[in-house]
Amino acid sequence: MRRYKVSTSGMLATLFDRRAAWQKTQTLEQLQHLHAELGERARNAAEEMNRELSESRSMLSCILDTVSQAIFWKDRNSVYLGCNRMFARNAGLSDPADIVGKTDFDLP
């Protein structure tokens, strides 16, 4: 009668390797899910911030156009960054957005 010696260390190593591979796969899937969820949250937050910024700019524009004074603002190089409707009209422009990027020498 022959006796066969069965090596259990090889089978255990294979089982441990499979378990480790399965755990890595599960971890990777969880990370991918979290990445997708965080991306969605970031997109939603950015959309909300853009909506709020748009509302804020609209309110500021309304206030500036309601004031009975000509208002403008420039950067450090004396380039116009914006103005209200009254200042644009006084400067000979049809729209306040037309003044952006101009200097006093560029005005009509």
Image (tube, helix red, strand yellow):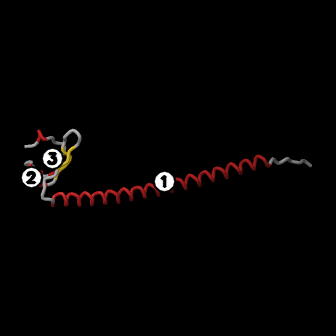
Which is nearer the eye, 13 or 54? 54
* Residue under label 2: 89
Name the quadrant of the C terminus: top left
Classify residue 76 as left or right of residue 17. Answer: left
Which mark is first along the chain, 3 or 1? 1
Classify residue 30 as left or right of residue 42. Answer: right
In the image, what residue occupies the spot 82% across and 48% down? 6
Helix or strand or loop: what does disc 3 sit on? Answer: helix
Q: Gap in Å between the C-alphas at discs 1 and 3?
A: 43 Å
In the image, what residue occupies the spot 20% across and 57% down? 61
Q: Residue furthest right?
A: 1
Residue 35 lies, in percent from the top left, at 48, 53
Which mark is first along the chain, 2 or 3? 2
Residue 55 lies, in percent from the top left, at 27, 60
* Residue under label 1: 35
Mark 1 packing: few (<14 Cα in 10 Å), some, or many (20+)?
Answer: few
